[in-house]
Image (tube, rainbow, N blue to C red):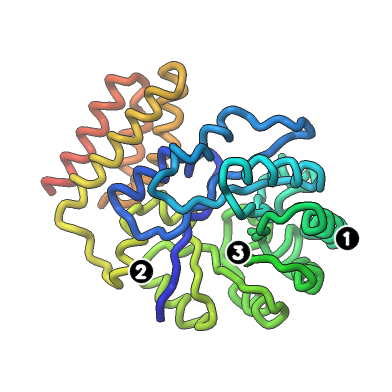
């Protein structure tokens, strides 16, 4: 069965530099979702969001912009902005689990308000020709919340709904709720994509068997933890390429150079790379030791030495 792999947007991680580097060195991802645009009540697109969506920064990629909002006017404003850049689709984030978002009634904190969701979709579909897709969780407090929303969504020509099979208040803790995801399949006519805990080829194959009607699969943290994963899934192999560390090294260096040029000051660069290594260390034979070595590096010089050390250790062990 043919299937499509999608990169789930992660704020602070999957920007255009990351997307381009993943695409160049590893491949396997068919479509990338850009991290969400948030307006905070001001009808202004921040320069970082602008840069991320510029067509010249996404030349070889299929990218779908995303918005997080609980306001129809904001939705329409961003729709117009992305259409002017040449995008035809805008993904609406009802999945973000972080309290600073959900307490404002956005992300997964909006799923409990079907009336507001209906109002926004009605206004957007009547005043714009943007194609709307959605990314959701099962709810914020309970996995039943989404079941009150699905009948409303069935009234609109939504392109697809990617469902992360957790509730918001879980954040990323605990397991995915596969029974609740099946309930969603059984209770909507919309095209659903699956998202959540695809972290290995074996896990992907298991999910494919569980949900034979799903042919679009979204990989989030699993992609940052293991950039080789999408191409390994596509080739149905759990074998890494022989030049694993050489490829990873080139990928790392391109990212590191990009962030070194775009971020101001050593602190910001190191913070960015340390966050990434919290995930990257998972492809090393001793993730804990690898991450610890990188985390201890508190200067650019020490960081570069630590990267050389962990990669050389891995290549020659």
Image quadrant assignment for residue 138: bottom right
**Horizontal relation, residue 95 to residue 297: left or right:** right
Image quadrant assignment for residue 194: bottom right
Q: Nearer the viewer, residue 295 or 161?
A: 161
Q: Which mark is residue 115?
A: 1
Q: Is residue 26 above or below residue 42?
A: below
* Residue drawn at x 75%, y 65% as measured from the top left: 142
**Residue 283: image location, x then y, percent:** 30, 52
Of labels 1 and 2, earlier in sequence is 1
* Residue drawn at x 66%, y 32% as measured from the top left: 45
Q: Is residue 165 above or below residue 212?
A: above
Q: Would residue 169 be seen by someone viewing this image from the given angle?
A: no
Q: Nearer the viewer, residue 59 or 248?
A: 59
Q: Nearer the viewer, residue 280 or 38?
A: 38
**Residue 286: image location, x then y, percent:** 28, 49
**Residue 178: image location, x then y, percent:** 59, 74
Name the mark nearer the viewer: 3 or 2.
3
Of labels 3 and 2, earlier in sequence is 3
Q: Residue under label 2, please give it.
A: 201
Q: Residue under label 3, please give it.
A: 162
Label 3, label 2: how far apart the Cα atoms are? 20 Å
């Amino acid at each position: 069965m043919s299937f499509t792999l999608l990169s789930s947007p992660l704020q602070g991680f999957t920007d255009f530099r990351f997307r381009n580097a993943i695409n160049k060195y590893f491949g396997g991802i068919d479509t990338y979702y850009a991290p969400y645009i948030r307006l905070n009540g001001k009808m202004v697109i921040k320069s970082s969001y602008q840069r991320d969506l510029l067509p010249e920064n996404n030349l070889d990629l299929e990218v779908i912009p995303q918005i997080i909002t609980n306001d129809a006017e904001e939705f329409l404003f961003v729709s117009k902005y992305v259409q002017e850049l040449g995008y035809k689709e805008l993904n609406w984030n009802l999945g973000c689990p972080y309290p600073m978002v959900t307490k404002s009634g956005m992300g997964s904190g909006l799923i409990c308000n079907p009336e507001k969701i209906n109002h926004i979709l009605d206004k957007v579909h009547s005043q714009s020709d943007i194609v709307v897709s959605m990314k959701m969780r099962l709810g914020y407090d309970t996995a039943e919340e989404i079941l009150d929303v699905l009948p409303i969504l069935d009234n609109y020509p939504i392109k697809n709904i990617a469902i992360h099979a957790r509730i918001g208040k879980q954040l990323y803790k605990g397991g995915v709720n596969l029974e609740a995801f099946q309930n969603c399949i059984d209770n909507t006519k919309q095209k659903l994509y699956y998202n959540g805990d695809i972290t290995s080829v074996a896990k992907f194959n298991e999910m494919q068997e569980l949900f034979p009607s799903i042919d679009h699969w979204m990989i989030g943290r699993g992609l940052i933890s293991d950039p080789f994963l999408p191409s390994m899934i596509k080739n149905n192999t759990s074998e890494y390429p022989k030049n694993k560390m050489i490829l990873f090294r080139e990928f790392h260096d391109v990212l590191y150079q990009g962030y070194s040029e775009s971020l101001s000051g050593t602190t910001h660069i190191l913070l960015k790379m340390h966050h990434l290594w919290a995930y990257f260390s998972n492809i090393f034979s001793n993730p804990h030791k690898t991450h610890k070595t990188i985390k201890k590096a508190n200067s650019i010089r020490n960081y570069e030495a630590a990267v050389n050390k962990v990669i050389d250790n891995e290549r020659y062990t």
